[in-house]
């Protein structure tokens, strides 16, 4: 076995090199690199020979055959679903003039530092192998803000979308679509514009997407950071507690008010009477009626922040009506959103859980195998976003001149994927797009099938044939069934000599036209194109 | 400033927590996590206030605004080119029955260990933050083999493609398209099949792709590992030196024979006479003529490996002729390919450098800014691949039963991107797909423009309008020019009252139909669909 011998030789050589480096007191990084190579070569040898590196025979598999915790492979059928979701969403983004950009999967560590508050501990760092300190991106918003800050002269305004993977060292919960590696799907409108106009179009885009994806009945909760801040001030929350009290309010979709109140008073030291006043406000939700009610609240309207927020909200609801999406929206004072950087309108789209298909035992088993420790089944939010007017400025050292205000949305594509997978029969998903299968009757006719396939490919027809010299007829039909290939070209020795082939509709039941329609070979392409609707 | 106050408060709180943890001798990882949060908060505060964390005022930018070395952003116009490349390639993959899968961007470190020989030192490791040791994928082939080994019962055969980013801590050379983060684009046919049939189809696929991408004149060099191994044996290379001598031969496209011979004899201790015999063989290239010449070489044909390889090659050339791609192929005994895992046919497609557009001064400047230290301008190989029959088996502990033979191709999409960018005028690339711009004459009519845009979106028409209350007519026309939007709907107050709008062909020169065609508003959608070819 040449490659075993060659490996053993390499191991000896690299081993010698490591010893020489150590003797000459070489740089540690250099020695480590060679040691890593050595260990790799030994492992490779072990895999080839079935021996472990210390020479003992090992039983079975030398490798842990799994993906890292919180990540998964997507097979061809799952990818067909995912690509359907992405193309549906991109179609809507493009309908609104969106263009896409791409940023690296890792950023300089300092770009990410200080953007995610306490969640910074979930950031994946790359090992310091010399050079720059880098970390995997945690979301697409911060890299986008960095891009704008770097290219602000060219991109004073842009409607950009980006669909890409982000990384969080969180506890995975696969049935909910929460992974350590997952896709984010963002659309942001950057630029200085008429108040609330892009903010409303973002909601219109969410409605178009969720409707096109058919995720079931959904509601988009909306609120405004200025209203919330004003409301907290009016209730008597000290200025330095506003952000932390806002975080507590954000938990109202997962916890009853009594628990949130306890967090505010006991953990965060808020006065009980102040908490009770907040409690009265944050239970309010509605539409224009709520807006009118708040506009009559003289105490609230006397607060500059609340007043500005309510004026925005009035315009917002008016534009949502023009965009024909007001019916999907609930003005909800309990919506606060966790992220610090929002400065204006905030929103979150939630699906009605009870309308979703249940999680199967099979899905639970898979989730458990993948290290999922979360027994909850809630899908919850499928889209969220809001206005963040100061993030780009942060990268420009706080300079007002270089700032670019933004408003954006994020579609929870992994959750949408979970919803669609729950109601799909995986077997029935078609991943292969082959249009014509080239089948031989009798002698195999491998080269003749290759010739026909070449003709089909040259005409842009998606075609396959069996990579066997003498395949059985039934085996060839079975492939058509399995991959649901709609058409077959059937050739036989005699027919080819006469210059004819048969075309068979494989989706039709076998009774009618069992043998297919006979046509001259020179008409084959034209006939197939006609049947495929491309003539 | 609420958020500054809130940040200061958080800094105090987290600082207290860190001290408390240290006093209580808490776990180091826990303390480190909190310290990281604290540093992040301080940096955030510094960015907001322009003060450095030790309280001193800092001038200008607090962040290094760049992407990590060897990585880059792709703006909307570059992305338009990239998506054109990807969709062209995917179209060919699907024409041959390809399906796609996805694997995580990082793998367990031990999956990658021992697969890349000395290049293992280029692997990016993730920092050990507790849990599994992981590393960014180095290519898509090893993760695919891991996927097959995990799912072999379901995927005994599959034609899979995958286009995804891979990572190598190499010296970047951007003008050549060599980056630390770059796309690989692979198509592999896995399964036990008739000899050389999938191997030949892979070449057909490369020709279809390179022709569709219009990269210019190209040649596909082909060779066979068994011929090479046999040839080395016949020349007298000791068994344990075959792989390393093969690596030396692989450098013949970059070095003259004299240098390669020196490496063989001086560095690798090969006998000079043996090297000279190799030298006679590896200068040979041709087509069927070369095959016939070698078949008459009795010494070579007496070697079992060489004979098996030449038999394969005969079949291979025959099938390439049937697939109508023989003219693109050069049987070249100097092609060896670096990777260890190839076991059969190997190939590499190269473009003719002298036909490519030159690199501009602007491109060189950009490359230098990005840390490119390579002054070479060679693009070289745009596709490579071969047969690797034992890689999947390595993951199954060398078990023959669980092995799945594979043959595949990789398209060098970054190099193709470089070629296309060299001949493109970036300004002239259209990234925005907007079809209709809604324009107001006179009073601004913001809400009316929003209404019309909503109607267009509801009909699936890609539409935009200016997010300004009272935009100037010329400003609106300028957007159409800049984004090359083909149609405009023009509204005015009087016209709307009369129930009419104007439709204007923005691609036509301003003279003809300067004001557009007037139609009733109820016919607007139908008329636009007709003009967009969708009626």
Image: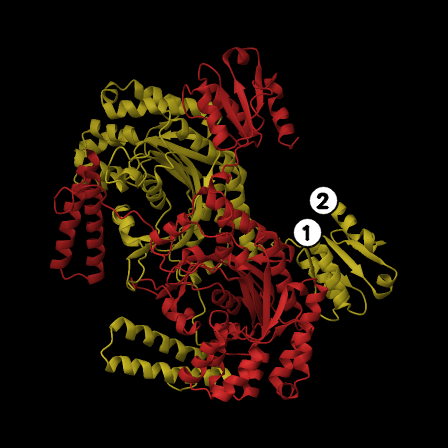
Chain colours: A yellow, B red
Q: Are marks 2 and 1 in contact (CB under 8 Å)?
A: yes
| Quadrant in the rendering for residue B507 | top right
- In the image, B17 versus A404, the foreground residue is A404
Viewer-closest of B148 and A399: A399
Query: How far is disc 2 from disc 1 in space, using C-alphas?
Result: 10 Å
What residue is shown at x 58% (from left), y 15% (from top)? Answer: B500
Q: Is residue A129 left or right of residue B319?
A: left
Q: Classify mark 1: residues with Cα within 10 Å, few (<14), some (14-19) or many (20+).
A: some
Q: Position of residue B149 (x, y in %)?
A: 51, 70
Label 2 Cα crowd, 10 Å radius (few <14 / some 14-19 / many 20+): few
The quarter of the picture where residue B57 lies is top left
- Tell me the residue that label 1 is attached to: A460
Q: Position of residue B124 (x, y in %)?
A: 36, 63
From the top left corner, tell me how far across and down residue B209 is, in percent.
60, 56
At x 39% / y 82%, what residue is drawn?
A11
In the foreground, B149 or B73: B73
Residue A460's x, y, as percent? 68, 51
Q: Which mark is residue B297?
A: none
Which residue is label 2 attached to?
A534
The N terminus of chain B: image quadrant: top left
Q: Is residue A352 left or right of residue B221?
A: left
A62 vs B171: above or below: below
Considering only vertical position in the picture, is A113 above or below B239?
Answer: above
Instruction: Identify the element where label 2 is drawn.
Output: loop
**Chain letter for the residue marked with disc 1 in the picture:** A
């Amino acid at each position: 076995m040449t490659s075993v011998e060659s490996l053993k030789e390499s191991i000896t050589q690299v081993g010698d090199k490591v010893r020489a480096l150590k003797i000459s007191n070489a740089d540690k990084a250099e020695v480590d690199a060679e040691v890593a190579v050595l260990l790799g070569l030994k492992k490779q040898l072990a895999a080839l020979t079935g021996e472990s590196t210390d020479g003992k025979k090992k039983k079975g598999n030398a490798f842990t055959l799994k993906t890292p915790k919180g990540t998964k492979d997507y097979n061809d059928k799952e990818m067909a679903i995912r690509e359907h979701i992405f193309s549906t969403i991109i179609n809507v983004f493009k309908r609104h003039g969106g263009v896409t950009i791409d940023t690296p999967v890792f950023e300089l560590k300092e770009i990410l530092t200080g953007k995610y508050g306490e969640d910074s501990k979930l950031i994946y760092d790359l090992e310091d192998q010399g050079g720059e300190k880098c970390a995997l991106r945690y979301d697409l918003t911060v890299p986008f803000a960095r891009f704008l800050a770097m290219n602000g002269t060219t991109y004073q305004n842009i409607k950009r979308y980006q669909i890409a993977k982000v990384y969080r060292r969180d506890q995975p919960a696969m049935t909910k679509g929460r992974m350590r590696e997952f896709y984010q799907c963002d659309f942001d409108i950057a630029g200085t514009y008429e108040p609330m106009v892009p903010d409303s179009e973002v909601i219109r885009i969410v409605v178009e997407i969720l409707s096109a994806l058919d995720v079931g009945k959904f509601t988009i909760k909306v609120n405004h950071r200025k209203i919330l801040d004003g409301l907290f001030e009016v209730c008597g929350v000290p200025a330095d507690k506003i952000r932390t009290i806002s975080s507590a309010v954000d938990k109202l979709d997962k916890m009853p008010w009594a628990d949130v109140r306890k967090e505010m008073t006991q953990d965060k030291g808020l006065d009980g009477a102040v908490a009770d006043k907040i409690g009265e406000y944050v239970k309010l939700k509605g539409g224009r009626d709520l807006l009118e009610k708040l506009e009559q609240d003289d105490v609230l309207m006397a607060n500059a922040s609340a007043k500005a927020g309510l004026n925005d909200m009035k315009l917002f609801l008016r534009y949502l009506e023009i965009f024909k999406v007001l019916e999907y929206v609930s003005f909800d004072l309990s919506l606060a959103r966790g992220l610090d950087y929002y400065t204006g309108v905030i929103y979150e789209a939630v699906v009605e859980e009870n309308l979703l298909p249940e999680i199967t035992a099979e899905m639970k088993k898979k989730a458990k195998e993948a290290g999922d420790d979360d027994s909850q089944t809630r899908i919850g939010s499928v889209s969220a976003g809001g206005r963040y007017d100061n993030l780009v400025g942060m990268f420009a050292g706080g300079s007002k001149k270089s700032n670019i205000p933004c408003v954006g949305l994020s579609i929870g594509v992994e959750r949408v994927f979970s919803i669609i997978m729950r109601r799909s029969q995986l077997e029935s998903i078609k991943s292969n797009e082959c249009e014509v299968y080239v089948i031989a009757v009798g002698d195999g006719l491998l080269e003749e099938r290759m010739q026909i396939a070449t003709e089909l490919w040259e005409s842009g027809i998606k075609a396959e044939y069996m990579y066997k010299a003498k395949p059985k007829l039934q085996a060839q039909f079975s492939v058509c069934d399995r991959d649901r290939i709609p058409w077959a070209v059937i050739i036989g020795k005699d027919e080819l000599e006469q210059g004819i082939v048969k075309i068979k509709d494989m989706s039709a039941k076998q009774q009618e036209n069992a043998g297919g329609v006979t046509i001259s070979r020179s008409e084959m392409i034209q006939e197939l194109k006609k049947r495929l609707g491309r003539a």
